[in-house]
Structures are given as C-alpha cells and as structure tokens.
Image (cartoon, coloured by chain):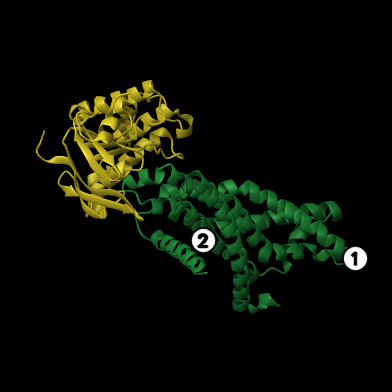
Chain colours: A yellow, B green
Amino acid sequence: MSDEAAVEFEHVCKTFGNRKVLDDVSFKVGQGEALCIMGRSGTGKSTSLKLMIGLLRPDSGKVCIGAEDIAHSGEEDLSRVRRHMGFLFQSAALLDSFTLGDNLALPLRRLDKSKSPAEIERAVDETLERVGLDLDKGKMPSELSGGMRKRAGLARALVLRPKLLLVDEPSSGLDRITASEIDELLLKVKKEYGATLVIVTHDVRGARRVGDCIAILDRGCLIGFGTAGELDKSDHEVVRELIAEC
Amino acid sequence: MKKFFAFIGEVSCFGLKGLWEAFRPPFEWEFFVHEIEEIGWRSLPLVSAAGLALGIVLSLHTRSTLVRFGAEAMIPSLQSASFFNELGPLITGLLVAGRVGAGIGAGIANMRVTEQIDAIESLSIDSFKMLVVTRIVACILILPMLTLYMDFTSLIGGFIAERLAAHISLQLYLDRAFKTVEWANFIPPTLKTGVFGLIIGTVSGFFGYTTDEGSEGVQRAATNSVVLSSLLIILTDVILVKAIFFLFPRDAI
C-alpha cells in the first residue's frame, strides 16, 4: 500500500439550502482499501460519493483523489481524474435509450480516446462476461431484472478498469442472495484490479464482509471510523446500533 | 408577479444558453441524429393524419358555403392560402408541442430522477449539450419540414374531398391551389415554425432538466411542457403574423 491516500476528505462542509448535510468531515482511504460509509438516511452518505466524483463541490474543505484536490479543479482536470474512477449508482442509472452494450461503450468512447472501435467492442464483451451478462449485450435496460441492472451498472463502472470504484447502495432493492452476489463481485474487483472501493450501504453484513474499514455518518458529522471490530467497541450508541448484526 | 417574471427570465436564459451552446464544439452528432428521428420521423403519422383530415374537413365546410355563390372553383386556392399562411404552421406547432413537448419534458425529467443525468456528468459529458441542446436544435430544424409536410398532406386531403364531390382532376386542383400562392406567403409562415421549435425545445427541456420532485416531477414536467409550449406558440404566432405583415405588406391585403 502506498503512503498517498486514494481518497481524502479534509474538513469538508456541504449545505443544501438551510440544511447542513456534511459538517467538517475528514477521513482518508488508503490505496486498495475498501471503505463502507454507513448512517441513517439523509446524513450525507450519497453526497459524499458525489463529492468524490466531482458531481458536487464542497462549500469548504478539500476532496483529494490521489494528489488532486478535485474540489477546486477545472473540468479538464476533473475529466482526467474521472478516467480512473467508476461509479455504480443506486438505481444503476443505465441510459434507457441505449442498449447494454452501448451503455458500456459510452465511457470508453468519451474518456478513452486511444481505443479503436474493435478494442472498445472487445473491452465491452470482456467486462460483460466478468459480471455474467455476456448474453445480454443487445438488451435494453428495461428488459433487465433488478439484479441484472445492478450488475450492468457495475459493468459500466468497471469498463474503464478504475483505480477507484464508488458504489451507492449496492444491495438496495435486492434479495439477500443477489446482494451477496454483488458483494462477491465487488470483492473480486478489489482483488483483481487492486481498486480502492468506497461503498455507501445500509447492509451491515455486506459492510462487514467487504469493508476494510467503516465510516459512520450522523447528521452530517463523522461519528465513527475504523474496522468493524473497533466500531463494535465504540462508546457512541448510534455507531453500535448501526453496525450491530441482526 | 415578481416570481412570474423571474420564471420567464430563467426560461429565456435557458433557451439562449441552448442556442449559444449549439454553436460551440464538441457537437453531439450521434444524439442529434437520434433526436431528428425521434422528433421528426416519429411525428409523421400524427402530422399525416391531421393534415389529411383537416384538408378534407376544410374542403367540405368551404364547399357548402361557396357553392351558394357559384364560387366553388375558389376552394383549392382558399385551401392552399389557409394552410400555407396559418393553419399548417400553427397546427403543426401545436401537434408537435403535444407529442414531442411531453416526450422531451418527461424523458429528461425521468433521466434526472433516475440519476441518468448524474451518470452522464460523471463521465465528463456535458448533459445540457447532450440532452437539451440536441433537442432544441432538432426542434428548430424539424418544425419547418413538418409544416411543409402538413401543407402537402392537407392539399391531398382537400383534393380527395374535391375529387369525390366535383370529379376535379389533380392537374386542375393544383393549378387552382397554387395560382394565388407566392413565395412571400409561403416561405415566412413556414420559417416562423422554427421559432415554434425553439419554444418547444426550450420550454420542455427547461421543465425536464430542472425537475427535482421524483415521479410527480416527471408528470408535472410533461404537463407543464405541453401547456406552456402551446400557450407560447399561440401568443408568438400573433406577434410573428404581425411581423410578417409588416415585412411583406402585400400579404396583409
């Protein structure tokens, strides 16, 4: 593991209207680690992910991806940083007017100009095979089940072979077995790509299984950060409640 | 009142930004072609049906009146004048506002609600250019073409009605229809529908792109797109007709 953090939040604050969603939040995620962010609904978990990929900018503080502070970088720098990032949205967010194959080809066409159409095709096929959707390349998103959409979203996030994978609620709306399959895929990605994972989740079992460390947010503040074992012994009642296994 | 003017200002800025961005690279050709197909090609059945039906109905109505004065020979020219000058552009604008405006408003709003716009932005693609500018430009270019098509189908409808009622030949019908038509009463009214296209693309793009109210927002975006686009088309039509009469005074007589 290198010394440089893959992701670093330094005193990040973010407000929507009168509501302070993140209040002076600071943490680091090391290269190749998996961080799970947990917390009650509306405590700034998804906002943290959107700050990491530059969809939102903090009101104050730094959001560093590697050595780059993306809170203050221009579109070109942001685009360069995003070349090494993948984002799995909660609803998978596949473009519904595109086939599955075209959904995967889009990041390659836009962010990796060096690839020829044949190379793009090959990369799409390989990634779909990796998530077990190689027979569904020509299907539209509306033809896919919830679990398949999630895997398709993951495939799109993986097609650029990212060093940093951001995942928003991978198990939401899925049964336990499918959620477990998604967790398996995430672990495989972490191992095979050496990727850093930041996962927002409510699924304690998944977080304990995939996460090297867990961050707990409550009312915009970071109230716990550490391994599951460390957090089990936390003095904070909300932390213990949130990571208690059912 | 203040809110109303602020809203008008917002929509206007949105439209102006759309026009400005249309001339700045990178150009989203792939999505533009898709929108041309979606807005133009898929509107053809509706425009065809409306043109044919209106052509027949207008011919039936005018015949019953003009026949009393022995002036039924004027039916083709009355038909062409009505459609080329006003009915064709206005009805095409309203039809497209209904079909396409609702589609654009609901489509973009749905993309916002289901995080597809965030997904596009996360790939460093300008979602405004990809989703809004392509639709605005497609609407501006397609509306005049659909208007021409509406004019054409209405003449076919009128001819069918006249053929059944008076056994008139196609040659004679077209001769009479185009006898009084000049470029000045044909080109400006057709081109004014480009403005209708700008209104439809801007208004529906605005409601879709700025929604943040979940599935209810999608429904509201679709409804508001149709209502405001239609209203603005009717009001703008009055202004544009006056402007055309000012620029081409012979048309006003």
Front of the two marks 2 and 1: 2
Question: Residue drawn at (60%, 72%), measured in percent from left and top?
Answer: B239
Q: Which of B204 and B29 is in front in this view?
A: B204
Which residue is most to the top? A177
> Do the CB atoms of the residues marked 2 and 1 lie less than 8 Å apart?
no
Q: Check the picture and name the quadrant holding the C terminus of chain B.
A: bottom right
Q: Is residue A190 left or right of residue B144?
A: left
The crowding category of the residue bearing disc 1, from other C-alpha atoms within 10 Å (few below 14, some 14 to 19, many at least 20), is few
Query: Looking at the picture, does residue A76 appear above or below residue A203?
Result: below
Question: Residue drawn at (21%, 37%), measured in percent from left and top?
Answer: A224
Q: Which of B162 and B114 is in front in this view?
A: B114
Which amino acid lies under the numbered mark 2 shown in the image of this protein?
Leu
Query: Which image quadrant is residue A167 in?
Result: top left
Which amino acid lies under the numbered mark 1 shown in the image of this protein?
Arg
Q: In this view, does B55 lie to the left or right of A108?
A: right
- The dot on residue B68 is 1
Query: Looking at the picture, does residue B118 appear above or below residue B133?
Result: above
Q: Nearer the viewer, residue A122 or A223?
A: A223
Q: Mark 2 points at which residue?
A: B198
Query: Which image quadrant is residue A219 in?
Result: top left
The chain letter under disc 2 is: B
Image position, residue A125 (x, y; %): 34, 28
Image position, residue B92 (x, y; %): 63, 57
| Residue A83 is at least partly visible in this image | no
Q: Is mark 1 on a helix, strand or loop?
A: helix
Query: Looking at the picture, does residue A79 appear above or below residue B137?
Result: above
Question: Residue drawn at (52%, 69%), measured in percent from left and top?
Answer: B1
How far is the residue under mark 2 from the one under mark 1?
Answer: 43 Å
Image position, residue A99 (x, y; %): 43, 35
Q: Is residue A43 left or right of residue B178?
A: left
| Residue A31 is at least partly visible in this image | yes
